[in-house]
Amino acid sequence: DARVTQTPRHKVTEMGQEVTMRCQPILGHNTVFWYRQTMMQGLELLAYFRNRAPLDDSGMPKDRFSAEMPDATLATLKIQPSEPRDSAVYFCASALTAPYGYTFGSGTRLTVV
Amino acid sequence: GIQVEQSPPDLILQEGANSTLRCNFSDSVNNLQWFHQNPWGQLINLFYIPSGTKQNGRLSATTVATERYSLLYISSSQTTDSGVYFCAVEGASAGGTSYGKLTFGQGTILTVHP
């Protein structure tokens, strides 16, 4: 089965450190999404790309978060500097052509201490 | 932005029982999807159903777009159905194009006991 691959699966870091999360979308999917899941806020869209171009990152705190797609096989989400309130599960998803084939990765569980 | 409300928030069933989960949304949509998050955290796409009815095995879904709600039916529930069920929508754009930009409800936590 085709899958979206996220690394790392778990990350514990100290406040102030830089964190980079990576996502390999399903080959041929042209849309990539980053979501964050917390108990309080649920699942929230942070940013998304179509054909590697950023379409919307209004859900992301711009001062510390950045999302890029350097090539069709890699999307990255970076937090610098990280804060305890960033602790959450970060999901990447890709779609063939939205809304079809919407597939989530297994997530990166981030803990900032 | 569009609001999504799911009910009930929690549901406990005995294996073999049937259930109906509801999703209400506040505006017109061109994209509605149901997802299941299993106890290990994996999100699985169940249905893309902006309108009409679909069935996949013991699961079926119906969306009545004009009345702004969707229902997910689970028949003959099994312990493996446990987890959180999310409804997610994308508000309708002027040109009808979907970008996949989903707003999620808070989910229904389903527990199925053997």
Image (spheres, coloured by chain):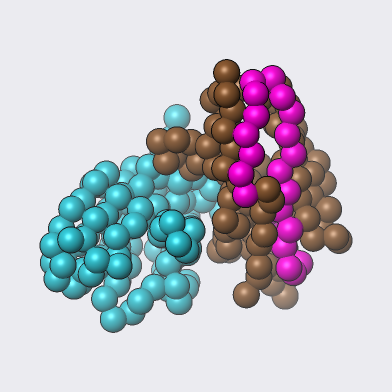
Chain colours: A cyan, B brown
Q: Residue at x 48, y 58 (%)?
A: A43
Instruction: Verify whether residue B31 appears in magenta.
Output: yes
Q: Residue at x 33, y 79 (%)?
A: A62
Q: Position of residue B62 (x, y in %)?
A: 79, 44
Instruction: Please state if A56 lies on the left or on the right of B24 as rendered.
Output: left
Query: Measured along the vertical axis of the image, is residue A50 above or below residue B18?
Result: below
Q: Quadrant of the C terminus of chain A?
A: bottom left
Q: Residue at x 45, y 35 (%)?
A: B39
The magenta stretch spans which residues? B9-33
Q: Position of residue B16 (x, y in %)?
A: 69, 20
A25 or B56: nearer the viewer: B56
Q: Main secondary structure of the magenta part?
A: strand
The mark tally for this picture is 0
Instruction: Verify whether residue B32 appears in magenta.
Output: yes
Q: Residue at x 30, y 65 (%)?
A: A86
Q: Answer with the quarter of the image where residue B112 lies.
A: top right
Q: Position of residue B114 (x, y in %)?
A: 57, 18
Q: Position of residue A102 (x, y in %)?
A: 54, 48
